[in-house]
Amino acid sequence: MTISIHDFFKKKKKRKAQAHTSEKLDIPGNLWVRCYRCGTTIYSKDLETALKVCPKCNYHFRLSASERISFTVDEGTFEEINPHIKSTDFLSFVDSKPYAKRLKDAEMKSGLPEVIVTGEGKINGWSVAVGAMDFSFMGGSMGSAVGEKVTRLFEHALHRKIPAIIFSSSGGARMQEGIMSLMQMAKTSSALGRLRENCIPYICVLTDPTTGGTTASFAMLGDIHIAEPNALIGFAGPRVIEQTIRQKLPAGFQRSEYLEEHGMVDIVSPRKDLKKVLTNILSFFDFKGE
Amino acid sequence: MELDYKSLLPFEKPIAELYKKIEDLQKMARHGKINLEEETKLIQKRIQKTRRELFAELTPLQTVQVARHMGRPTTLDYIGQIFEGFVELRGDRNFSNDPAMICGIGKLDDLSCVVVGHQKGKNTKENIARNFGMAQPEGYRKALRVMRVADRFGKPIISFVDTPGAYPGIGAEERGQAEAIAKNLRAMAELHVPFITIITGEGGSGGALGIGMGNKVMMLEFSIYSVISPEGCASILFRDATKASLAAEAMKITAKDLLKLGVIDEIIKEPIGGAHQDTKLTAQNIKKAILTNLKPLMHMTSRELIADRYNKFRKMGIFENG
Ligand SMILES: [Zn+2]
């Protein structure tokens, strides 16, 4: 979700960020992948072993929801909940193509029915309610289905008395659902109020990118905030800010390390340490579930 | 009657032409050629009629123009008309006072209320001072602080929403604009007191929702409420900011549409030609709506109020399952 009062977006610049997904960088045959940042060619098996972090420059490739879950949750322990909740084109919204078509295309492209996969699993033995967002599905945008799945995940955590973790990756609210996407911010945040009231821990893992309505709701309301290195995290997108204030943005602006410096995240954790950090945190909370 | 062309919007051109006619008549009358009074009356009748017709069928983008009208009454205008003994409460007790957000206490007839609302200006100078009604994180944190005063002392909260959006700036990001709004959302769901929101002008995205989670949410007839500005949506989805009209239609941002979607509870009537034609009458309509809606809420326990608000927002969303 971006805010605009003026005519902010006159020039359409192709954003480099769109090329962040590893998929686009694959060389035919899928055996070798080129690092987006440093250009090093990496054998894809090696990249996989390195949890999709460039061994040369430490660039953290964006993960799909299934990669995230397989890198984080103990093998064979993940059980998905609410897999059938999907978006629907209730406004008959048409921009350059109909929303209904956009949803179908997103499903084809990502292999997922929606942006977020939610479920219960174990992290080094600790039961957690876990959600992983996938940026390749319509930029990880939050519409009614995402809001509902997130809310139900929190309700699941509350019911099972286990901590909740969400790996966020989202450009914000889904404009094709109009105001209803905005209402998801209210819905998910209210559900978090209940978790809080009942002293159920909630851990946010902010990954690249997390912006807009997602940041301004459930992604910023954790008891603990972890960010992956160099992830873009913010409310307004950098372009909107630049066009509003007509100034260059400071180096590293809205990146994880910058947010850590300004007190918005607890830890910036490299992906290779993430499971260990999560385990320490879960061990601290010591919730065994019911 | 004052002939004010400046306040007329582009789509009000037929009205401008009628005003022009009156002006011409006045000139002619100086040469003593016509019965000015009678002719003027006739034209004024036509102005009223034209206005009524135009405003009965505004397009979404025309509604946006009315909602953003420079002369549209602001939160402070309404506070002045609706509340007695208003005392403004400033500052977030942490960083600064945000002039784009007005908070305070006052009496609604006999009832003590807490008031929060975005504040726009009515000219460029005022707008710069008020940052065009775009609040910083401090604004949201101040609103929360003052809403918590209401919560502690069992007073109802009335919020007035009128903002293009939360401010997108370097400082705002550094000080956690997203965190401030998110925290307000969670906190508003937990308020123990009656809470009413009125969208009076622009309900711009998260910046609007950041003070907008009332048990009852109402909109002035020509206000808008939207996840992104039509211009923003147009340039992102339609790749062309001039397609704002299409975006405004597609997103469903008018009071009528939002009532249909169940996102708001009531539409508050505006004078013909928009709120800026008659601040007093608009304020009266708002006050009536507040009192009517507050009444049943005042009889609810804090538990019931929280449940009412929770269920209201919990239900929001349209999706498939299965
Ligand atoms: Zn690299």
Image (tube, coloured by chain):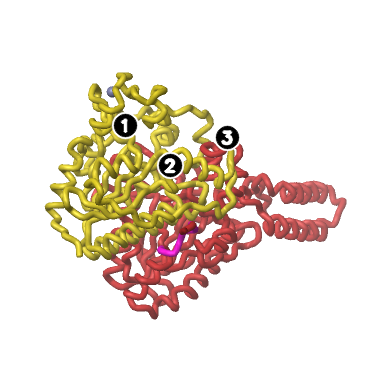
B190 in relation to A174, above or below: below
Residue B84 at x, y percent in the picture: 42, 69
State the CA–CA distance, disc 1 to disc 2. Answer: 18 Å
Q: Residue at the location (21% across, 51% down)?
A: A122
* Residue B88 visible in the displayed image: no
Query: Is A72 on the left-hand or right-hand side of B226?
Result: left
Sort mark 1 into few (<14), some (14-19) or many (20+) by Cα contacts within 10 Å. some
Sort mark 2 into few (<14), some (14-19) or many (20+) by Cα contacts within 10 Å. few
The image quarter in which residue B183 lies: bottom left
Q: What residue sits right under mark 3 in the picture?
A: B240
A48 in relation to B70, above or below: above
Chain A shade in the render? yellow
* Residue B151 visible in the displayed image: yes
Residue A62 at x, y percent in the picture: 33, 35
- Amino acid on which the number 3 mark rests in the picture: Asp
Q: Nearer the viewer, residue A226 or A44?
A: A44
Q: Residue at the location (47% across, 43% down)?
A: A107
Chain letter of disc 3? B
Q: Residue furthest right?
A: B33
Q: Secondary structure at mark 2?
A: loop
Q: Nearer the viewer, mark 1 or mark 3?
A: 1
Q: Secondary structure at mark 3?
A: loop
Q: Residue at the location (54% across, 61% down)?
A: B261
- The numbered disc on residue A61 is 1
Magenta part, dominant SS: loop
State the CA–CA distance, disc 3 to disc 2. Answer: 30 Å
Q: What residue sits right under mark 2 in the picture?
A: A111
Q: Residue at the location (59% across, 38% down)?
A: A96
Magenta residue span: B314-319
